[in-house]
Image (cartoon, rainbow, N blue to C red):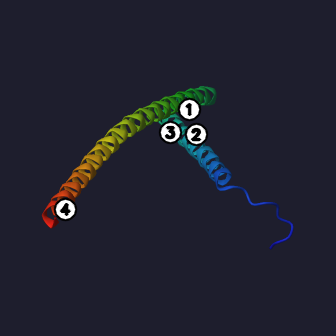
Amino acid sequence: MIRGRGPRPEAGQVSALVAEAEGHLMAQAHLDEARREADELCAGLPWLTSTQAEELTHRYVQRRLDFTRRMLRSTVERAAQLREEYEARYLQLRRGLFRRHVACACAVLACACALGTLTGLFVR
């Protein structure tokens, strides 16, 4: 045992921390990409003053991030809808499979009982 270390975090805590870090890194990557695109746009417009270029960069980045948020929200909503649809279908298929297994088990049991009865009649 290594001294000086506290209790190990639970797996759920670790995965939540990893997911949070991943989300932060993805958000930062989107922000960096939006700034790079805005800088490229401003570079193509050499007549802009530095103040105008900064304003255009700010507006572009803001609109780009708003668009990204809307897209992510719609993706999350659609994923939730699909999950509900798939879970409902899965439950329906499971119930159907269960009914078929019960019917098959009943048929096998009925055949076994009939065979036992016939065997008992012939043995007498």
Disc 2 to disc 3: CB gap under 8 Å: no
| Between marks 4 and 2 in the image, the one whose residue lies nearer the viewer | 4
In the shown orientation, is residue 93 left or right of residue 27?
Answer: left
Q: Which residue is mark 3?
A: 37
- Give the answer, above or below, for where 120 lies relative to 45: below
Q: Mark 2 is on which residue type?
A: Leu
User: Of marks 4 and 1, which one's residue comes earlier in the chain?
Assistant: 1
**Residue depth check, mark 2 versus mark 3: number of the one nearer the observer:** 2
Looking at this view, is 37 or 123 the one in front? 123
Element type at mark 2: helix
Q: Mark 2 and mark 1 in contact? Answer it, CB < 8 Å.
A: yes
Residue 116 in which image quadrant? bottom left
Establish if 42 lies above or below 28. Answer: above
Instruction: Specify few, some or many for label 3: CA neighbours under 10 Å numbering under 14, 14-19, or 20 or more.
Output: some
Between the C-alphas of marks 2 and 3, the distance is 10 Å
Frontmost of labels 4 and 1 is 4
* Marks 3 and 4, how far apart at CA: 87 Å
Label 1 Cα neighbours within 10 Å, binned few <14 / some 14-19 / many ≥20: many
The image's mark for residue 61 is: 1
105 to the left or right of 55: left
User: Which tag, 4 or 2, sits closer to the chain's start?
Assistant: 2
Label 1 to label 3: alpha-carbon separation: 8 Å
Quadrant occupied by the N terminus: bottom right
